[in-house]
Image: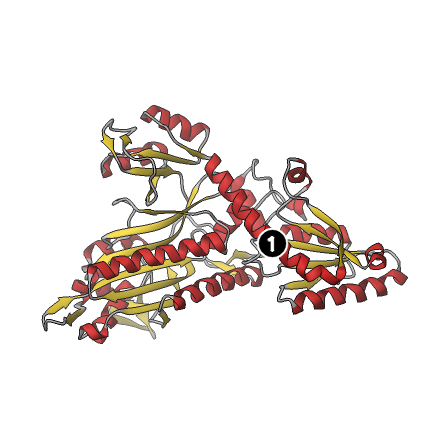
Amino acid sequence: MASKITPRREDYSRWYLDVIREAELAENAPVRGCMVIKPYGYSLWEAVQAGLDRRFKATGHVNAYFPLFIPKSFLEREKEHVEGFSPELAVVTIGGGEELAEPLVVRPTSETIIGYMYSQWVQSYRDLPILINQWANVVRWEMRTRPFLRTLEFLWQEGHTAHATAEEALAETIQMLEVYADFAINDAAIPVIKGKKSEREKFAGAVESYTIEAMMGNGWALQSGTSHFLGQNFAKAFDIKFLDQNNEMQYAWTTSWGLSTRIIGAIIMTHGDDQGLRLPPVMAPIQAVIVPIYKKDEERAAVMAFARNVEAQLKAAGIRVRLDDREELTPGFKFNDWEMRGVPVRVEIGPKDVANHAVVLARRDSSREIEAAGGPKAKLFGVPADGAAAAVQDLLREIQANLLAQATAFRDANTHTGIRSYDEFKEVLESKGGFLRVHWAGSSEDEDLIKAETKATIRCYPLDTPEGEGVCFYTGQRTSRVAIFARAY
C-alpha cells in the first residue's frame, strides 16, 4: 500500500495527490476543478466543524443560513469587493428556461447578502451586536485547482458580525483570529503564526485582514484561516444603520472571518510522511485500530475473542476504535493500510499476547528511524490488557503533543532570519526555501516586484515581533515592521 505513494523528496505535489487517493479522502468530480469528498475525508471535515462550532458558541456566536444565490447588483455596491472577486464569479443568467431579469451570482462569499439582511434587522443600538456564523459551500472559478487547497467549490464556515463601535468590531476580529489559532494548534497540531495581511494580500473590501499562516512539509506557506475588520465599508454599501444611545443615526461596524476545507490539506502536508497520513488524535476519525494476528484456525477464536474484549474496553473509554477483522488480508497489509490512513495507534494482538494477557501498541508518529535518532519508541510491548484503554489514552495525548512539537521544530528550522540584502533574500529562498522573516519598509509596488521575480509573497506581518527595530533588506531603511515572505499555495 505504501509503495503506491510517491516519496516526498521525489515529487511533493505527486505525493500529496497520492496520499489523498490512497487514503480515500477525495477524488476528482466530473466537473473540472471540483472534488468529491469521500467518507474518510468528510469525517475530517466533521472534526473541523465540531472543534470550531464548540469554540464559536463559547464566544457567543449562533449559526444561521443565507442563500446560495446573490443578486449581481449586491456585489457591485462595494467597488473594491466586486473588483476583487470579478474574475472568480460564476453567474446564473437563465432559470426555468427563461432569461433572468437580474443575473444571480453563485455565492463566492456572503458579505453582500448578509449585509443586506443586517440592514433589515438593525434599527437601534439594542439590536447590536449581531454574531452569526454559517456553514456553507462557496464557488470561486479557479483556473488552477488542487484537492482541498483550491477548488471551484469548497466547504467552509463564514462568520459575519455587526457592532456599534469600531473598537468592538476590531476586538471581534482579533478574538476570532485567536479562536482559529487555538483550533489549529490544539486540535490540528499545526503551529500557525498569527499576523496581519499586507495591503496587497488583504481581503477585497476589508480595512484590515488577519491570518493564521502555516508551514507545509515542503517549506511553502498555507493561509489557513482569515479574520477581517470591514470597518463601515459594507455597512455604508448596504445601509446598516442604527440609532445610538444619543438618538443619533450611525453606521454599524462589521467583520467577517472564515476557515475552509483547505485546513484538511494543511493537516495532510504538515504531518504526512512517505508512508501517508499522520493524523493528530483529536482530529482522527479512527484513533486506534486493533489488528488480530494468527496463523492457525485454532488460534483465531482465542485471538478474536480477546481482541473484541479490548475493543469494548477502548470504546467504553470514549476512544474511536476499529477492529480490523478482514479475513482475506494479511496483518502486514493491514499495518501498511492503517499507517497510510494515519491512524495514530495500532493495537496488535497475537497468540502470545493472549497468553500473556497483554497487547502491543504501535504509534504512527514514530518509526524505527525516529526511535533510533532519539525519538519516542515506535512500539510498546507487553502492555497489560486490563489497562489497555488508559495506555492508549496516554499514548494519544503524547502523539498529539509530539506531532505539534515535530511540526514546530520543522517550522523553526526552516525559518530564516538575519537577511541583509535582496541578493541574499533570493539566494536563501532558492537554496533553502521556507519562511524568510525580515524587516520590511517596502511599498506595495516593491512587494509586487518581489512576487514577480521570486514568486514569494508577504504572508503576514506577525503580531509577535520580539525583533524590535532593524534594517529593511530591500530598501535599507530602518523600520520596526517585520514581514514573513514565502512561496505559498
> Tag 1's secondary structure?
loop
Rendering quarter of residue 318: bottom right
Is 256 on the left or on the right of 16, as rendered? left
Q: Is residue 204 visible?
A: yes
Residue at 56%, 53% in the rendered image: 280
Toward the viewer: 175 or 320? Answer: 175
- Where is residue 224? Give x, y as percent: 41, 51
Q: Quadrant of the C terminus?
A: top left
Toward the viewer: 179 or 1? Answer: 179
Rendering quarter of residue 233: bottom left
Disc 1: which residue? 23
- Where is residue 306? Give x, y as percent: 79, 64
- Where is residue 441? Give x, y as percent: 24, 34
Is 450 on the left or on the right of 184, as rendered? left
- Asked if 304 appears above or below 86 in the picture, the reply is below
User: What's the amino acid at mark 1?
Assistant: Ala
Rendering quarter of residue 454: top left
Toward the viewer: 40 or 258? Answer: 258
- Where is residue 231? Give x, y as percent: 21, 58
Q: Is residue 33 visible?
A: no
